[in-house]
Image: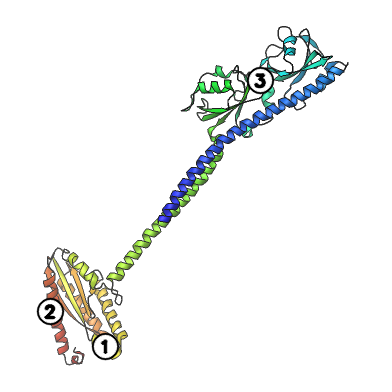
Amino acid sequence: MVLVLWVAVASFWVTEQVNRQEEQASFTSLAEEADKLARSIEERVDSDREKLTLLAEILAMGEEAPAEYLALYQDTGSFFSRLELLLPGDRVVTADGEEVSAAGRLSFAQEAARGAHVTDRETDLDGQSPVVRHYVPVVRQGQTAALLCGVIELGELAQELPYQPYGGQTAVYLIDGATGDFLVDTWHTGQQPGNIWALGSRPMAEGYNDAQLRQGLVNGESNFVVFRSQTTGEYLYFYYTPLAVNQWRVALSVPEHLVFARAQYVRSLLDRMLAAEGAAFLLYLCWMVYYIRRETREMERQGWEDALTGLYNRNRYQHDLPILAQEGRRELCCIFVDVNGLHELNNTQGHQTGDRMLQEVARQIRQDFGTQWSYRVGGDEFVIFAVDRDREEILRRTRTATRELERKGYYISAGVAWTPAPARDLAPLLQAAEQRMYEAKRSFYQNAAFDRRAR
């Protein structure tokens, strides 16, 4: 039992430790997913930079119209929706070769002064669509002759992300930490990217607040907050981490059930294991209770039952006397039985024959009087009690038992006595029944046919 309890306690402890580890692993996985997305974006930006640099070098050497190169460089696995060329005088050469004025929208001087760089969110030449521009200078004779520009249309950027965290089951955000502007917002699909601070306060979980989120995004920290979704009512884990591009931040908004999917799966397995252990323990406990009770009953039976006859023995007789003294409401009857000739039968035919005689007497007692108050109190002596039974019925049953045994060649002497019930003292009743048994025994041996059996 101690071992079982120890195993149960150990199982609960191990389960709790595994749950904690799985929860920690879930947070680690959340961070890893965000980090994978951040690194993949950085790698794509670096790859785009290399492609732009290569094309800028080609443009710097060529005399051909740049529009031919701009038109060729499309759909090449980059973030770019199209390529343009920003010229001095704030003019732009588009991919189809058209040259348009960007005065008031783009400044060649300002962008050239920054060298190769990525802008934050700004407006396209149409004055409406949000874009990000990736500039690389085209240098001739040590001077910036033009700026090659990869235009990233933010409305299409979400589809171009090189990695989909959690298999695409989570909302992805690309945020400018300096302004709060969204570059990517996959939660509010079909809308122009907004601003995270313009969304207002969120119902944060205990221990989290909006100030913590703002500070983390502005300072470029890697952390998370938890708030309740106003749409689904489920807690969302909003994890953010910085990018090595401007002050951009990658953020994931992951439903709680997805964050802890593995932990919940493991927890369900552990719960099943504990349930199985509990069921096994309960079955074992039930079996132990049954076994102990069975063994206790068997020990009691062995301690209170006469092995030869199956009736109660003298120990049970002594135990039941105080109980019998309180039994009944009218009268209590005692029948004292002695088996005649047992000693002689053992001496002449052996103890096995004598045992069979005792067993037959016991069988007859069970048949006529039952076993509740029937006892073998000595080698050849039996005592039977009857509570609130009709006297004539008791005498009739006594005579019937005597005749049935005589028919089989066995002889008994029986003494019957009564006392009012409940009786405070059974001694007079027992003495009276025993005395009448001896009287019957003397009468038996006075018969000439049986005087050879005299003791």
Q: Amino acid at mark 3?
A: Asn
Q: Earlier in the sequence, mark 1 or mark 3?
A: 3
Does the image show residue 410?
yes
Q: CA distance from mark 1 to mark 2?
A: 24 Å
Left or right of residue 201: residue 182: right
Q: Earlier in the sequence, mark 1 or mark 2?
A: 1
Residue at the (67%, 21%) spot, across then down: 155
Residue 435's disc number: 2
In the rendered image, which quarter is residue 25 located in? top right
Q: CA distance from mark 1 to mark 3?
A: 117 Å
Left or right of residue 261: residue 103: right
In the rendered image, which quarter is residue 300 located in? bottom left
In the rendered image, which quarter is residue 346 located in? bottom left
Q: Name the residue tied to disc 3.
A: 246
Query: In the image, which is nearer the foreground, mark 1 or mark 3?
Result: 3
Q: Name the residue tied to disc 1.
A: 345
Q: Counting other residues with Cα less than 10 Å from the Cα at mark 3, is it few (<14), some (14-19), or many (20 or more)?
A: some
Q: Amino acid at mark 1?
A: Leu
315 vs 283: above or below: below
Instruction: Look at the image and tell me in which quarter the N terminus lies.
Output: bottom left
Q: How many marks?
A: 3
